Image (tube, coloured by chain):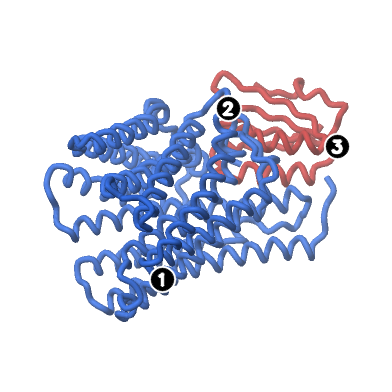
Chain colours: A red, B blue
């Protein structure tokens, strides 16, 4: 699967939400969004859930959140985690 | 929108809930500017003998309370994770009672001789504001896992409730429905709880989340985010008890002033440590607001030990207004473009205007310069009471709020235009 990478750690609000929503609206089933952020983006996850996206979140030992999202229901997002 | 725990934008109220209060606040601001211009021509004195009370309440209730109510309807779901059901209908009831109440109150002050006006003002304003408080507090106290912001909001709303209660006492005393034997004490508590309690505590509570989120700054120290709002509220309660017991309150006021100075200092320092220091007028507004809070509190601190002259006291009131308005403008210019974009985008409008298309950063900068000129001009008016300076101040107040009103109407127009004329995308 093609990875769309988004490092939102130094983005000011609401740039992370704006950019990630743009990717969600335009990406295909062969792609997934890999976002890293300083906080868990609850609004994004709620929107993604409502729109039928698969999601997986993980907070690493440096307190960084890894957020993986895809339209493809066949994907196991845990396997794509990169920590 | 802002935070993490329990935060939900999906539960955010429709954009009209927020904008109706923001537009109302701007209209009261424009009216205030007009009143100041009329006053500079020497015409207001022939209309009323209560100019300063009218100006204070237009600012504190008509403008600040309007902004705060709108912001609270928006922020409670997103910052505290609580939902007010049927927000459009309930906000409309609050708004209607509130606007009628403010107009009646200002008319009562202007007329000053019709007791019924004071009673009606207290009835409408009291009903609208207590209903809003009930809607918000009812949900806030249900939260199991409080954040520093949600706790601060409860204390802020509690202070607001006390300020409204004291305000009703004052209105009934003015109308002759009460003997008003505690008028002076209650008056001091009314503005202490309104300004240091409700308004300041709300700004502090919200800042604990938004400063870090909006501007990618380090967090506030835990001791500050955890205990500051509670300490301020406790000191205000102690001050209230001391006033009723006839005990000197200078030392309590001094501690409050020191706490506010500390908070403002930490906020400026957080903003200095931004990870991406871009040129952003909303940051300038935050810095200006915090600077003005420090000025107010330094004067308050000195005044709690030595009697200072009237002009300096007036200047401290102005700097407090400068603090509150600067933060309100900074928040409005973040909230309105974001909400417009978010609601449209979430409804599936792919061509939803971006935040910069709704309110351009240059427009915010322009407003910042007008705001600074306005504060500068009013400051000079305090020390040199010259007709031309007073008129310029009035014109700048009018300009400042007219520009804000224009920006809000522009955002509403963009929102409606996008809904009517662009295609929806199902995703």
Task: Tell me if residue B69 can be seen.
Answer: no
Chain letter of the residue carrying label 1: B
Q: Which residue is mark 3?
A: A29
Relative to B322, is B44 above or below?
below
- Residue B119 is situated, as x and y percent measured from the top left of the image, at 45, 56
**Label 2 to label 1: alpha-carbon separation:** 41 Å
Residue B153 vs residue B341, the one in the foreground: B153
Q: Which mark is residue B143?
A: 2
Closer to the N terminus: mark 2 or mark 1? 1
Q: Quadrant of the C terminus of chain B?
A: top right
Q: Which residue is outermost to the top?
A: A61
Q: Quadrant of the N terminus of chain B?
A: top right
Residue at horizontal 44 percent and vertical 35 percent from the top: B155
**Label 3 to label 1: alpha-carbon separation:** 56 Å
Q: Residues within 10 Å of mark 3 (few under 14, many from 20)?
A: few
Q: Which residue is mark 1?
A: B33
Callout 3: helix, strand or loop?
Answer: loop
């Amino acid at each position: 699967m093609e990875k769309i990478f988004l490092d939102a750690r130094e983005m000011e609000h609401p740039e992370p939400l704006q950019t990630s929503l743009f990717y969600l609206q335009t990406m295909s089933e062969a792609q997934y969004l890999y976002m890293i952020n300083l906080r868990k983006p609850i609004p994004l996850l709620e929107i993604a859930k409502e729109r039928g996206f698969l999601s997986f979140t993980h907070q690493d030992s440096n307190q960084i959140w890894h957020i993986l999202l895809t339209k493809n229901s066949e994907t196991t997002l845990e396997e794509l985690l990169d920590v | 929108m802002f935070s993490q725990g329990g935060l939900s934008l999906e539960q955010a109220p429709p954009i009209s809930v927020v904008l109706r209060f923001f537009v109302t606040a701007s209209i009261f601001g424009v009216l205030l500017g007009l009143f100041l211009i009329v006053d500079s021509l020497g015409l207001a004195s022939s209309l009323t003998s209560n100019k300063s009370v009218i100006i204070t309440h237009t600012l504190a209730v008509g403008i600040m309370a309007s902004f705060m109510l709108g912001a609270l309807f928006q922020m409670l779901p997103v910052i505290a994770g609580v939902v007010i059901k049927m927000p459009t209908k309930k906000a409309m009831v609050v708004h209607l009672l509130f606007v009628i109440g403010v107009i009646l109150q200002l008319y009562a002050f202007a007329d000053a001789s019709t007791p019924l006006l004071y009673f009606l003002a207290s009835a409408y304003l009291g009903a609208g504001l207590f209903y809003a408080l009930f809607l918000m507090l009812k949900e806030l106290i249900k939260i199991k896992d409080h954040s520093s912001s949600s706790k601060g909001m409860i204390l802020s709303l509690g202070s607001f409730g006390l300020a409204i209660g004291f305000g009703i006492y004052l209105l009934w005393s003015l109308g002759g429905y009460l003997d008003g034997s505690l008028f002076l004490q209650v008056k001091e508590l009314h503005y202490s709880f309104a300004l240091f309690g409700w308004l300041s505590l709300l700004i502090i509570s919200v800042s604990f989340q938004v400063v870090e989120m909006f501007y990618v700054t380090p967090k506030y120290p835990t001791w500050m985010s955890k205990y500051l709002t509670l300490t301020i509220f406790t000191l205000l309660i102690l001050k209230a008890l001391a006033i009723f017991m006839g005990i000197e309150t200078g030392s309590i006021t001094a501690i409050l002033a020191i706490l506010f100075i500390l908070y403002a200092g930490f906020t400026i320092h957080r903003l200095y440590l931004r990870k991406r220091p871009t040129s952003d007028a909303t940051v300038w507004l935050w810095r200006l607001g915090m600077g003005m809070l420090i000025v107010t509190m330094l004067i308050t601190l000195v005044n709690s030990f030595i009697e200072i002259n009237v002009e300096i006291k007036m200047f401290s009131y102005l700097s407090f207004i400068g603090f509150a308005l600067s933060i309100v403008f900074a928040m409005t210019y973040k909230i309105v473009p974001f909400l417009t974009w978010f609601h449209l985008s979430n409804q599936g409008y792919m061509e939803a205007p971006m935040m910069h298309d709704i309110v351009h950063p240059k427009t915010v900068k322009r407003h910042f310069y007008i705001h600074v000129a306005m504060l500068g001009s009013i400051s000079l008016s305090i020390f040199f009471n010259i007709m031309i300076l007073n008129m310029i101040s009035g014109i700048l107040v009018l300009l400042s709020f007219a520009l804000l009103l224009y920006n809000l109407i522009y955002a509403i127009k963009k929102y409606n235009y996008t809904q009517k004329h662009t295609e929806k995308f199902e995703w």
